[in-house]
Image: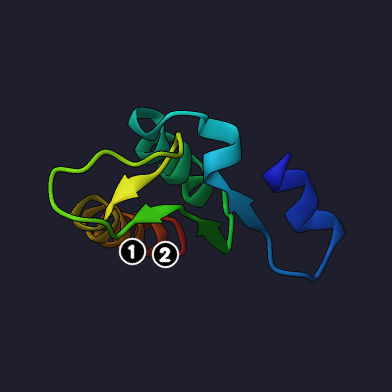
Amino acid sequence: AIARAKIRTHLPLVVDVPTIAQRSRYSNAVACAAVGCGADGVILRVWVGKNGDPSPIPATLRWDEAVELAEKLRAVGAAVRR
């Protein structure tokens, strides 16, 4: 769907990762797949609570996980756009 939308529109495509993933353990795979398919950006849900406290909302990443994923997504995006 992302590839087809990129052909049909000039607008940037942003993927809502938490809605698709439904669980935080799938967020990395969904976000990398979206950027790898050509998405211009992703929406992530990040929990900035106390260390060790679980997030009350599913598909929410801890801050350190989100930073690590952002670095990975930059690398994936750079490789795709070459």
User: Which residue is rendered at x = 40% and y = 39% of the image?
Assistant: 56
Is 28 in front, or is 81? 28
The N terminus: image quadrant: top right
Look at the picture and state if 21 lies above or below 14. above
User: Which residue is rendered at x = 84% and y = 63% of the image?
Assistant: 9
Instruction: Say which of marks 1 and 2 sits in front.
Output: 1
Q: Residues at badges 1 and 2 in contact (C-beta under 8 Å)?
A: no
Disc nearer the start of the sequence (1/2): 1
Residue that carries the numbered disc 1 in the rendered image: 74
Is 21 in front, or is 46? 46
Q: Give the residue type that dot 1 points to.
A: Arg
Q: Give the residue type that dot 2 points to.
A: Arg
Instruction: Give the colour scheme of this rendering.
Output: rainbow
Q: Secondary structure at mark 1?
A: helix
Q: Residue furthest left?
A: 51
Q: Position of residue 67 (x, y in %)?
A: 24, 61
Task: Name the quadrant containing residue 50.
Answer: bottom left
Left or right: residue 37 compared with residue 9: left
Is 19 in front, or is 74? 19
Please tell me how crowded label 1 is: few (under 14), some (14-19), or many (20+) other residues with Cα within 10 Å. Answer: few
- Marker disc for residue 48: none
Q: Position of residue 17 (x, y in %)?
A: 53, 44
Q: Position of residue 71 (x, y in %)?
A: 25, 61
Q: Secondary structure at mark 2?
A: loop
Residue that carries the numbered disc 2 in the rendered image: 82
User: Which residue is rendered at x = 33% and y = 63% of the image?
Assistant: 74
User: Which residue is rendered at x = 45% and y = 45% of the image?
Assistant: 31
Look at the picture and state if 12 lies above or below 14. below
Look at the picture and state if 32 lies above or below 70. above
Please tell me how crowded label 2 is: few (under 14), some (14-19), or many (20+) other residues with Cα within 10 Å. Answer: few
Task: Name the quadrant containing residue 20.
Answer: top right
